[in-house]
Amino acid sequence: MKNHVQLPTADETVKALNIGPKIRRIRKQKALTLQNLSVATGLSKPLLSQIENEIVVPPIATLLKISRALDKDIAFFFQDTNSDTKITVVRASERGSPDTRKLGGNEIGYHYAALAYKKNRKNMEPFFVEFGNSDEKNMSYYRHVGEEFIFVLQGKLEFRTTEEVHELKAGDSLYFESDVPHAYRSLGNRNATAVVVLFSPPGAGM
C-alpha cells in the first residue's frame, strides 16, 4: 500500500540533518530511480521526492523503510560522522542541542529524537518520542518490519491497531510486532512521552 499520509513541512533545524540529500545520494550511488525506491518501500514517488527535497519530514516507520531499501542503518540519517565504536554515549545536552535531531510534527502525531544516533550497525533503534493529541479519525496508522517496545514516561498514551485499543499510563510498557498497522495519540491535557525501541531483523524484507 502506498503511503499518502500528509507529513509536516521540514524546518531549518530538520534540514540541518541533510536526511533528504543523504537519501538521494545513496539512491543514486546504488543506481536506483525514484520508481525503484517506491517499489522497494511501498511509498509513493511524490512522497519520496518530497522527502529527498526536504519538503516534508518522514515518520520513523517511513524512514525505516527507506533505510532498509537502501541497505543502511537508520542511524546513518542522524549521524554527522560514520563511527564504528562499540560504545557510545549521547548526553541530554546533545539530544537537545540546536541540531536537536528531533523530527516529526502534529501532522504525523508525534515528534521523535534518536537516542543512539552515534552508534552505527545496530539492530535496536531507541527513540525519545513526544505524542500529541489528535482526533481518532485523524490518527495515522503505520507498519514496518520488526518489533517495537514502548515505555511510557509521562502522560496517557492510546495505542491502536485495527482490532485493539490500549490506554497506557506512566510506567506502563507495550511490546508488539510492528508489521501490525498501529497508531498512537496522547490523551489528556498534556502530551505523553515515551522511550520507543525498534528492532529490525538484519536482512529482513519490507
Image (tube, rainbow, N blue to C red):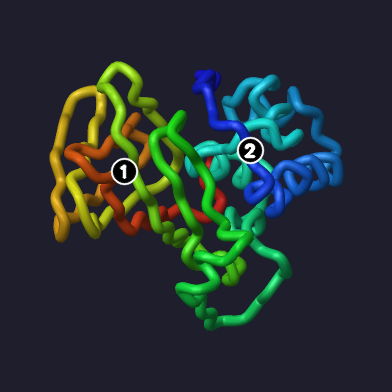
Farthest residue toward the front? 189
Cα–Cα span, label 1 and label 2: 29 Å
Q: Relative to residue 155, is residue 9 depicted above or below?
A: above
Q: Position of residue 50 (x, y in %)?
A: 69, 28
Q: Nearer the viewer, residue 119 or 131?
A: 131
In this picture, residue 77 sits left or right of residue 106: right
In this picture, residue 22 sits left or right of residue 134: right
Q: Nearer the viewer, residue 29 or 139?
A: 139
Going 33% across and 38% down the picture, which residue do you hit?
132
Task: Say few, some or many: other residues with alpha carbon within 10 Å of mark 2 (under 14 / 14 to 19 / 20 or more).
Answer: some
Q: Amino acid at mark 2?
A: Ala
Where is residue 128, by image quadrant?
Answer: bottom left
Going 57% across and 38% down the picture, which residue do you hit?
58
Q: Position of residue 105 (x, y in %)?
A: 48, 38
Going 57% across and 71% down the picture, which residue do you hit?
119
> Disc 1 designates what residue?
177
Task: Say few, some or many: other residues with alpha carbon within 10 Å of mark 1 (under 14 / 14 to 19 / 20 or more).
Answer: some
Where is residue 106, by image quadrant?
Answer: top left
> Disc 2 designates what residue?
10
* Disc number lying in front (1 or 2): 2
Q: Position of residue 144 (x, y in %)?
A: 45, 38
Q: Relative to residue 72, is residue 179 depicted above or below?
A: above
Q: Nearer the viewer, residue 33 or 195?
A: 195
Q: Mark 1 and mark 2 in contact? Answer it, CB < 8 Å.
A: no
Q: Relative to residue 74, is residue 131 depicted above or below?
A: above
Q: Earlier in the sequence, mark 1 or mark 2?
A: 2
Q: Secondary structure at mark 1?
A: strand
Going 31% across and 43% down the picture, which residue do you hit?
177
Which disc number belongs to residue 40? none
Q: Secondary structure at mark 2?
A: loop
Q: Position of residue 63 (x, y in %)?
A: 57, 42
Q: Amino acid at mark 1?
A: Glu
